[in-house]
Each structure stands twice: as C-alpha cells, then as structure tokens.
Image (cartoon, helix red, strand yellow):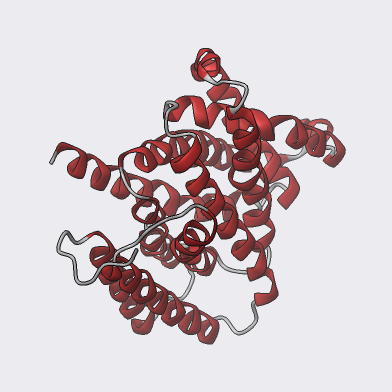
Amino acid sequence: MKNIDQKWGYLIILSMIWGSSFILIKKSLLGFTPIQVGGLRILFASLLLFLIGFKSLKTLEKADWKWVVVAGLCSSFFPPFFFALAQTEISSGITSILNSVAPLFTTLVGIALFGLALKGRQILGVFIGLIGTVVLITAGMENNINQNYWYSFFIIFSALGYAFNINIIKKHLSHLSPLAVTTASFGVAFFPALILLIYSGVFSHFVDNTDMQQAVWYLLALALLGTALANILFNKLIKLSSPVFAASVTYLIPLVAVLWGFLDGERISIVQLLGGLIILFGVWLVNRKKTIISVG
C-alpha cells in the first residue's frame, strides 16, 4: 500500500512540474534561441546534479555505462532541444498533448525489444488514453490553424526517446539509485550541450541582452525544477512502478500545460476538456487492480 501511495504521489507531482515546463519553455524562448534554451537547460540541471549526486556515480559499474549513454542521449540530451524547437511553431499546450504518445511508445518498445508483458486492460487503457490525445490534437489544430504541425515530429521523436529510456532503466539500471541514474544521464549530455552553447554565442551576448537577462529566470526554473528535480522523481517512479505506469504521467501533463496556456492567452475548447477526461480514464484503466484479460 505504501508503494501504491508513493507512486501516485510521484505521478501527481511530476504532472504538475512537467505540465508547467511547457509554459517555462515558451517564456524562455522570448530571450533565447531553441538551441540556447535546450543547452542551458541541460547545463544548469547538470551542474545541480553534479553538486548533489556526484558521489553516487561511484555505484555505477563499467557495464552500466553503455546503457547510461543510450538512456542519457534519448532522454537528457535530445528532448530539451527538440521541445524548444517545436515550441517555436506549436503552442505550449499542443506540444504537451503531442507528448502524450509516450505511454504508447513505451508499451510498443517494451514489447518489441525488452520482453514486456502487459495485461489486456493495460493495453486497452493505453489506447483509450491515445484516443483522448487524438481528440485533444484535433481540437487544437482546429483552434490553431496557423501552427506548423510538421514541427510535431520533434515531439514524436522525443516521446520515442523517453520510451527507450524508461525501458532501459527498468530492465538494465533498476539496481542503481534514481539520483545516480539521473546524474550519469546528464553527465552524458553535458559536454555536447556545452559545445553547442559555446557555438551559439550565448555567453558573449548575455551581458548586453536585456531579453536574455529577463528570460533566464524562467530557464533556471525549467532546468532546476522541470529537469533536474523532475528526472530524479521520475526515475524513482520507474523504480517503484511499471514502465507503462511511469509513462502515463505524460497523459496528465497536458491537463496542467493546457491550463497554463489558457492563462497565458492560448485558446481552449470544450472538446479539449473532453479529451482530457478521456485521458484520465485511460490512466485509471492502466493502473486498475482488477484484471480483465491477461496477455503473455
């Protein structure tokens, strides 16, 4: 019972933190380029993680690092850049909604490559959640016809990266502490992100750029809360629960993100709210104790 309460607690906290990340990305882009937003997000988060988690790296064995490198690139390096690039053309609320395909990808990758066995009601819950996501996307496209939805592929690729990350951690890195996994993953992302930042000229332009100086506070909140802290909590959630349950946080994130978007002037419709309710039902079904049918 304690683990059940903990995992639901982590799920709710993460949905609040990550649901707020999209509006923080939007505000950060007022002063920085997408490459700078992604790179500084990784840089700030890495520095905090090195400060509090450097000693935990001693617990990693040599064999762990090959999985850490893949997981780190999939979840800690590419997504911060991809999300920032996507939000140059797509609203923060819609971006968060597109990210909701992560549980479906987690399921498919887990079954195809990691021997994941699911119960029938979990598969049904995943697809119900996906239906809710499609409703939200369709409604968003109708409300925002001027947005370039080709940029949605950046989010799709990020969600696929998250799917690999979740399954890798659950199968190959679950013996490590969440802090060790998170710190090592950002250690992988740190140096390539730093190189991109130097190339972008952000360090030389910051002193004289008022927009950067105002936006950096949003970026700090995004990096320290929405990246460093959230990834530690997420890795704890993966350790406590199934990959599908952990990935279902992306079904709750849009509810928070769309609300933030609405408060910031983005449009929201009754159909989008209906899609949100369908998503919640899918999350409940994935995690309901009673088994309908078994698979595998």
Q: Position of residue 205 (x, y in %)?
A: 82, 36
Q: Is residue 53 above or below residue 125?
A: above
293 lies left or right of 64: left
- Residue shown at 63% from the left, 29% from the top: 65
Q: Quadrant of the C terminus?
A: bottom left
Q: Does residue 87 appear in the picture of this structure?
A: no
Q: Does residue 285 appear in the picture of this structure?
A: yes
- Residue shown at 49% from the left, 67% from the top: 101
Q: Quadrant of the N terminus?
A: top left
Q: Is residue 248 above or below residue 123?
A: above
Count of picture labels? 0
In the figure, residue 199 lies in which quadrant?
A: top right
Q: Position of residue 128 (x, y in %)?
A: 34, 76
In the figure, residue 123 lies in which quadrant?
A: bottom left
Q: Depth check: 185 or 250 in front?
A: 185
Q: Position of residue 272 (x, y in %)?
A: 38, 78
Q: Position of residue 148 (x, y in %)?
A: 68, 76
Q: Depth check: 245 or 215 in front?
A: 245
